[in-house]
Structures are given as structure tokens and as C-alpha cells.
Image: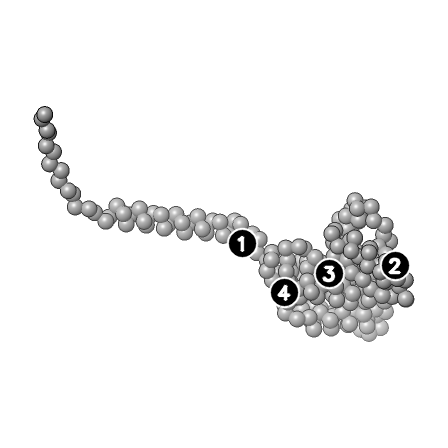
Amino acid sequence: MRYTRYDLKHRKSSSIPFLMCLTIILALSFFIGTFIFKTFIKGTEGYGNPQNISNDYGKKENGGKLFIIQCSANSKKENADKTLNSLENIGNPFEVKSNGLYKIIYAICAEKDYSSYEKAIKDNKIEFNKFTINLNKGDPGDAELYSIISAYLQAVNKLGDKDVKSVQTASLKKWCSNIKEYDDTYKNYKITQEIKKHIEDLPAGIDKNNLSNEETFLYNELVKIK
């Protein structure tokens, strides 16, 4: 039996190719990570975390309609609570007591948002009453009050989003403090001042634990508007 002999010469290993590969891998990881952050993580900033409401309220509103959507008015709290529980799957209802009745309010909203709330209720075959607050576009005092309420509603209703845990209020409070005040002869001057004071006294952030209290406060102010 013949054997063929091979002399294998061991080459000196070089670290240069390894370092080059490592550098390329690290660079690719950096760029891919940056892309994922900008595309997905940054795009959902605020969901499940403290969220700043947008500056849309900074645009002067000219008045308009606000709606209170009421789904029940019962003398017995247990009956009202049944309605409240039935609505919790489709929104953030709250309960107020007024004139001896327990009233279940499904939502308070601006005119532009009303249709989506109405659809949710009708799709679930729930009876409701709609109460309209008209703030005159030609009245400077009404226009100011509408702007303040719309801004406040934006913060409160944002808390209704299931993925939002809290809303930061610094920008809202700053905006509200810079609004020009009209004289105290305006018919709803006191209400305007009460809402502004409430906004200015808000904590730095409000969360879902505050939601019912904020909605109740706003309801009690809206029903006083002349």
C-alpha cells in the first residue's frame, strides 16, 4: 500500500479580516437599529407613556358647538351603574348626580368628533340623548371660551385612548395663561375664569385615574353656560 505524503504548511493567522468583518457587522447593526427606532419606536412615542398634547389648540377657534352625550338618567344608582358598565367596553363614560338623578354621560366632545361617538353608540344599539351647547362665532367672549374648552377636551379625551397612560399639561397650561381676557361683562365670564383656573392648577401630568374627575368638572361647567 502506497501512501502519499502531503506537507501542510500552517499559515500565520491574520486578525485583519476578522476585524474588518467585525467592523462591518457593528456598522450594519448601528444603522439597522437607528432605522428601526426612527420608523417604529419613535413613531409610537407617547403610547403607554406620558404624552404631550399637540399644539393644534394654539390655533384660535371661532366658536361652535359642543355636545354632551347622555345615555341614562335614573333615580336609582344601581340602574345607572348597569348602564355605566355596559358603556365601558366602547368608551370612557362617567356618572354625575344632578337634580336628584344619576346621569351617565358617554362623552363630551366638539362638533368635529361627534359622529364617531354617535356611531359607536348606535352600533351597540344604546339609547342616548344629545345636548348641544352653542357658542356664538361672532361673540369674542364665546370664541375665547370655546377655544379653552376645546383645548381642555383635547387633553381629557386623549386620556381615553387605551394606549395612553398619561398626558403632560405644561404646554396647555402655558397656552391658556397667555389667552387675552375679555371684560367681566361677558355673560359667561365666570365660567371662563373657572375653567382657566382649573387648567392652571392641573398637575404636570394627568392620568386615567384623573379622567372621571376631569370629565365631571367639565360637565358641571358646561351645563352652566348661558
First of labels 3, 4 by sequence position: 3
Inter-mark Cα distance, 2 to 3: 23 Å
Q: Between disc 4 and disc 1, whose residue precedes?
A: 1
How many C-alpha atoms fall within 10 Å of the one at disc 1: few (<14), some, or many (≥20)? few
For discs 2 and 1, the disc positioned in front in the rendered view: 2
Q: How is the image coloured?
A: one colour
User: Looking at numbered disc 1 in the image, what kind of residue is underneath it?
Assistant: Lys
The quarter in which the C terminus is drawn is: bottom right
Q: Earlier in the sequence, mark 2 or mark 3?
A: 2
Indicate which label's residue lies in the foreground, 2 or 3: 2
What is the C-alpha distance between the residues marked 3 and 1? Answer: 25 Å
Task: Give the residue at mark 3.
Answer: 153
Find disc 4 in the rendering and name its residue.
Answer: 168
The circle on residue 2 is none
Tag nearer the camera, 2 or 4:
2
Q: Answer left or right for 205 relative to 132.
A: left
Disc 2 target residue: 73
Give the residue number, with chain letter if any, for mark 1: 42
Q: Quadrant of residue 213?
A: bottom right
